[in-house]
Amino acid sequence: MPLLSVENLTTAFQTDDGLLTAVDGVSFTIEPGQTLGLVGESGCGKSVTAFSLNRLLPHPSGRILSGAVHFQGQDLTQISDQALRAIRGRDIGMIFQEPMAALNPVHRIGRQLSEVFLLHTPCSQKQAWDQSLDMLRKVGIPDPASRAMAYPHQLSGGMRQRVVIAMALALKPKLLIADEPTTALDVTVQAQILALLKDLQQEMGLGLLLITHDLGVIAETCDHVAVMYAGRIVERAPVHQLFAHPRHAYTRGLLASIPRLDTPRRSSLRTIPGSVPPLHLLPPGCRFCSRNGAPPDSPTLLTRPPFREVAPHHFLETCPRCTAPPQPDPTPSPQLAPQPNPRPLPPENAAPLLELKNLRMHFPVKTGVFQRTTASLKAVDDISLALHSGETLGLIGESGCGKTTLGKTIVRLYLPTSGSLSFQGIDLSRASPRALKPLRRDLQMIFQDPAESLNSRHTVGAILEEPFVIHRLGSPAERRSWVAELLEKVGLPTSAASKFPFEFSGGQRQRIGIARAIALKPKLIVCDEPVSALDVSVQSQVINLLLDLQKDLGLSYLFIAHNLAVVKHISDRIAIMYLGKIVETGPADAIYQNPRHPYTQALIAAIPLADPALRASRPLLSGDIPSPIHPPPGCAFGHRIQCPNYQASLTCDLAPRELSPGHFVSLCPCAVAGATPLPQS
């Protein structure tokens, strides 16, 4: 008997548009100790499926219309709420997508974790507390006694995710549902979390339903994969079989959209045209045909294709159009032809567009009743960089290392503490607000979260017209014409000008943010994690758009991200940032082919590869970035790789050394001597 068997599950929501089906006839099984990956774009119904299994749907709008969810032979759709509450947490654990939203901000970590034991087991407060500390220790949280007394906001993203995992596994459940457990995490923390889940799964023998849109995570962790599109599973197979022989056009499109380390740098990535249709516009037949080039009157859109086994354990929604073998194209499309690689570097005597010298951005730390300054948070600490016209400089590092602070300092949203910030030969660190205003036409920023950076009360047209109004450019008629041109340039219809930001998908909102950034034809754009929260297919569209705009407008980019494959694809040079400092910088190919700093090696080793045949054990970083308020002297990285010479390295000279033309490393001499156990990738 399978641990979990889902049969023709159908879930719908009552809305103003009527009853809308979000999950339509989904079926799958999970055996004890097995991991099933559920993958698809946002809006495909993955999270609704997970909530349906636990009957956590919003009341009264969401309800299960039909189907069965058999857990250990018991149909969870038919039992009472009281019986289901006894199963939740005890036998079925769940890791929610956003740990900050899953944790109560007004209660300490230890109290929230103790509640799990107090509700489901006969134990005292002291016993619950001791078991909570044991769970925190088991999920790799150092000093659990002090962490248990902290509030959620006092922990890093990786720490909060570990706490949520500890709560989900506290009672040793038989089934764990993990909804996007690593989406917003750094690649190093993601690798730690996935390794932790794998170890705990082997120890407890639990079944795991892993929901994600990251195919690299799927390839590294799952035994079977179910590909979901518009509420239906369109393909299901063992992971090795699915990646080696994808049969559905949607699966092939997702795999082709992934930027890989071996993808020709700066080439156009393959994309899936269009987007997931809204629930009230779903066709009765094949739901992917419209994105696969089918005309509106195609018969495949009218009749639901059967879901059948086409090979041993390989199931497929057999639409004749979407499952036809791809035809080889003897003449590759010009848009997929890679650009010359690498691009020639600027002459040594060329003046940089942007130059930073010993730049520092320290924030005062105030404590006590009178809020006196007692320390400084060194977010950016003595950074020197240069960026030339038409060049892309990638900036990589874990959360908390100072990447976003550096980007905001460059565009003068922060006033630097010290050092020089030269843009087009003008020192912005000393410029007055009046002197800055004309310079802002040439210096713009794309923010990480487009939903937060776009004014929800203004139409898209008003948002895009605002830069022209501020700088007093053009007449009202000319501004409207320019807005239409901007929308066309970023691939949106001109009718979008009359709509509000909430009416668009995440990828479309990011395009609006890009349109606003290029409105005044700037010379430099700081891109702060512009694709981190997007689906892989939308991510490829945005990357292609940025490359096309750079080619057409001659833009320069400072591209901040934690997805190293994306950074390598788009960048000419790469800088690695750790604890407010640059530890390695050089040409993109040199950084990936010959990483010299142990931190760079660890970042590259942690990249999940979208190929299950390449699964391998790899060294993982331990611990978190040290506090930027009290950073250790000398080498601040030795404690994370168990460097045997860590104490000696506290006095190391970390001045940058040029190892090859343009390749600089602030390398600890202990690493040169072979003390660092991390192999080069």
Image (cartoon, rainbow, N blue to C red):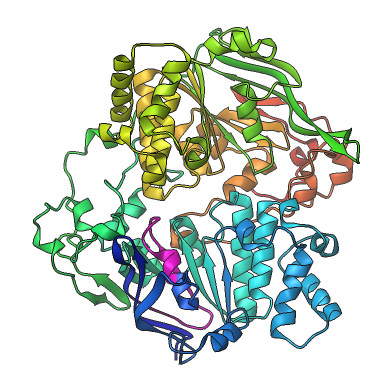
**Image-quadrant location for residue 101:** bottom right
Residue occupying image coordinates x 34% and y 38%: 499
The x and y percentages for residue 79 are 48, 89
**Image-quadrant location for residue 330:** top left
Magenta span of residues? 26-49
Q: Does 130 sit left or right of 45 as displayed?
A: right
The x and y percentages for residue 111 are 77, 69
Q: Is residue 201 above or below residue 511?
A: below
Which residue sits furthest front?
16
State whether residue 308 appears in this view. Answer: yes
Q: Does 415 sit left or right of 480 as displayed?
A: right
The x and y percentages for residue 33 are 54, 80
Residue occupying image coordinates x 42% and y 50%: 535
Q: Does 236 sit left or right of 378 as displayed?
A: left
State whether residue 36 appears in this view. Answer: no
Q: Is residue 133 above or below residue 255?
A: below
Check residue 102 for magenta coloring. Answer: no
Q: Is residue 7 above or below residue 262?
A: below
Q: Nearer the viewer, residue 302 or 498?
A: 498
Q: How many marks?
A: 0
Q: Is residue 192 above or below residue 588?
A: below
The x and y percentages for residue 486 are 33, 25
Quadrant for the N terminus in the image: bottom left
Residue occupying image coordinates x 53% and y 16%: 440
Q: Nearer the viewer, residue 236 or 438?
A: 438
Check residue 46 for magenta coloring. Answer: yes
Q: Nearer the viewer, residue 606 or 544?
A: 544
